[in-house]
């Protein structure tokens, strides 16, 4: 059990300050983002919690989701060329799944509860509302 004491303390403090439901949601979100839990397990309440902690980008529901544009709009890349380099180096993940180096668009069908979690590298993450 990695860092069991720290995780237990964090859970108990969150429970005391924000209540058990919020503590459970925070624990679940943390396990998904940083552990081994499946993104498909996230509920609407979990996404509400995520949106309090991560940048949220609302995407146009009708236009194609060009990956380079989305990365720039989300603040995960400074330019389209930088965005393409991140994709080519396989540093981009959608809902925890690494995108292939030749990916050019985002697949709306991968949305969970109307959201995609876009990650660059280890720690830079945003919630996309699709």
Image (cartoon, rainbow, N blue to C red):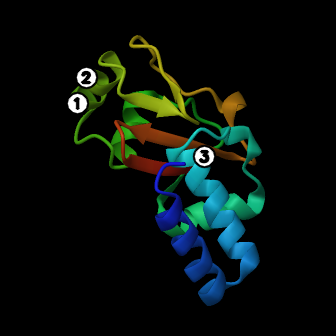
**Secondary structure of the residue carrying numbered label 1:** helix
When asked about the image quadrant of residue 69, the answer is top left
Counting from the top left corner in percent of width and height, residue 59 is at: 56, 47
**Secondary structure of the residue carrying numbered label 3:** helix
The CA span between labels 3 and 1 is 27 Å
Mark 3 is surrounded, within 10 Å at the Cα level, by few (under 14), some (14 to 19) or many (20 or more) other residues, namely: some
Residue 6 is at least partly visible in this image? yes
Nearer to me, 119 or 84 = 119
Locate residue 110 relative to residue 74 in the image: left or right.
right
The CA span between labels 3 and 2 is 26 Å
Tag 2 near tag 1, CB within 8 Å? yes
The CA span between labels 2 and 1 is 5 Å
Mark 1 is surrounded, within 10 Å at the Cα level, by few (under 14), some (14 to 19) or many (20 or more) other residues, namely: some
Q: Which mark is residue 85?
A: 2
Q: Pointer 3: what residue?
A: 32
> Who's the residue at 52% across and 72% down the image?
10
């Amino acid at each position: 059990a990695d860092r069991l004491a720290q995780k237990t303390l964090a859970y108990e403090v969150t429970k005391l300050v924000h209540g058990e439901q919020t503590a459970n949601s925070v624990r679940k979100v943390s396990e998904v983002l940083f552990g081994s839990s499946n993104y498909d397990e996230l509920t609407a309440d979990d996404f509400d919690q995520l949106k309090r902690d991560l940048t949220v980008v609302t995407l146009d529901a009708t236009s194609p989701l060009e990956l380079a544009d989305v990365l720039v709009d989300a603040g995960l890349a400074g330019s389209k060329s930088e965005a393409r380099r991140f994709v080519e180096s396989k540093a981009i993940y959608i809902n925890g799944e690494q995108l292939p180096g030749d990916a050019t668009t985002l697949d709306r069908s991968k949305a969970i509860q109307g959201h995609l979690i876009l990650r660059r590298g280890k720690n830079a993450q945003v919630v996309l509302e699709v």
